[in-house]
Image (cartoon, coloured by chain):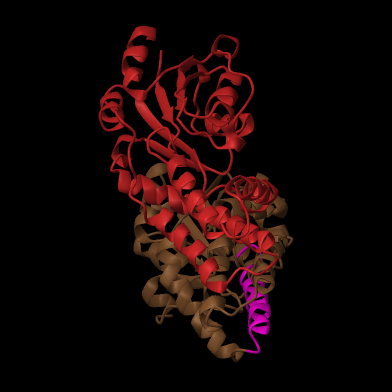
Chain colours: A brown, B red
Amino acid sequence: MLDIIAFDADDTLWHNETLYSITQAKFAELLAEYHDPSSIAERLYATEMRNLGLFGYGIKGFTLSMIETAIELTDGQIAGAAIQQIIDLAKAMILAPTQLLDHVAEVVPQLARSYRLMLITKGDLFDQETKLARSALGQHFTHVEIVSDKSVASYRALFDKYKIDPAHFLMVGNSLRSDILPVTALGARAVYIPYHLTWAHETVDDHDPQAHGYVELEHIGLLPALIEQSG
Amino acid sequence: MLDIIAFDADDTLWHNETLYSITQAKFAELLAEYHDPSSIAERLYATEMRNLGLFGYGIKGFTLSMIETAIELTDGQIAGAAIQQIIDLAKAMILAPTQLLDHVAEVVPQLARSYRLMLITKGDLFDQETKLARSALGQHFTHVEIVSDKSVASYRALFDKYKIDPAHFLMVGNSLRSDILPVTALGARAVYIPYHLTWAHETVDDHDPQAHGYVELEHIGLLPALIEQSG
């Protein structure tokens, strides 16, 4: 019955939000003489949301939003050296090794023996390709799709492109908004594996697996058994 | 014989380098009290090349390189307001309407009636999707591939992915380095249509169409006749 298993990447296969979270803490330190951490975080999030339609997802857009926020919050008084430190934070994020989540290194090759695997991730093309190359998981995926957004329309376009029957498709991810709800809305299966951190933009109110036809797992190590049971 | 015609996008279908060139001139104005335009341009290019492996192609990476160059060239003295102006230049580039080159609006729909058309462009995923959407050309392309780099390896990967026989494939573009030489190296056909501006990074020394098996045209309006002649 099941033919293709698709995985989200950030915070599903490898740690990502942790890296943003560490960077934000350093960004707040940089502005500590001007404002408290929580108002800095709030203002940065507002800038990111305002810029999302222009910059899209990813480290470079996030960095431009950090710089813009730093200028705003200091009334333009921020020093050139501090702006350079923000750019250096971005470079450190880009260069950070890809850290796989627990169980991923075993589960992905195991499932690849029985199913076609896909990677469907949003964000910056160049960042994501770099992370995939460093992960050493690339050989297990038949298709890799880096998309600018994950909506019902973008999944439908992928189903058309690869002639995928939703009845034979399963998506695994950590974002209800991006990985789960648009997929179940198209009649495909989805497994939700929450990550301990969620970016505010990815949160949704509704969390009822039964009503939305998805299964929730505690970690990806439980996925092969679930797939075996449900056939 | 010919089955798929693939087009580069930037400076092949729509103007792009012009936009970078205008932005660079404004960037030089912003730093005019510190340095002359040619040394600013030289330093910016050096920063871009140093950062290319981290940021990849596209407006956001270019902007981070402009900011870094401005900090360097002013020994960190640049004002926050000037950095904000650089970010605003980036936003203006992102928001700029997609301006098609002459003949594109006629030639693309015309060729789409007889051949499968592909768009193969490098750069920022989000930028390129936005430009394609604004171009109103999207409906004519069977496949759109936004890649992080255009090398022999990346074209070979696309040929494998779409089961393309190089003998039935033609690539049209303005960069010998990215659109022409890797394609003819794989045994496919290529038509080189130079744009009046070329980014230094895209230039190559060798320009002999016969030796490298490509055809050079003055403008894209001449493409349908060439294809008809050569079958």
- Front residue of this view, candidates A111 and A1: A111
Seen from this angle, which residue lies furthest bottom? A36
Depth check, front residue: B163 or A231? B163
Q: Residue at x 71, y 68 (%)?
A: A102
Q: Residue at x 29, y 21 (%)?
A: B114
Q: Is residue B32 left or right of residue B118?
A: right
Q: Which corner quadrant of the image does residue B119 belong to?
A: top left
Judged by its main secondary structure, the magenta piece is helix
Is the residue A162 above or below the residue B5 in the image?
below
Kindly tell me whether residue A164 is visible in this rendering. yes
**Residue A79 pos. (x, y %):** 65, 75
The quarter holding residue B182 reads top right
The span shown in magenta is: A12-33
Residue A19 is drawn in which quadrant? bottom right
Instruction: Pinpoint residue A9: horizontal percent, then vertical percent.
Output: 59, 60
**Number of marks present in the image shown:** 0
Which percent across, then down, holds residue B24?
A: 51, 50
Residue B172 lies, with reference to residue A122, above or below; the image says above
Q: Position of residue A82 (x, y in %)?
A: 67, 74
User: Is A24 within the magenta?
Assistant: yes
Q: Residue at x 48, y 54 (%)?
A: B26
Whether residue A193 is visible to the viewer of this picture, yes or no, is no
Left or right: residue A4 versus residue B35 is left
Q: Residue furthest front?
A: B33
B108 with respect to A78 (left or right): left
Determine whether A207 is above or below B24 in the image.
Answer: below
Residue B170: say if magenta. no
Query: Where is B68 relative to B2, above or below?
Result: below
Which residue, as the protein is rendered here, is positioned at the far right? A97
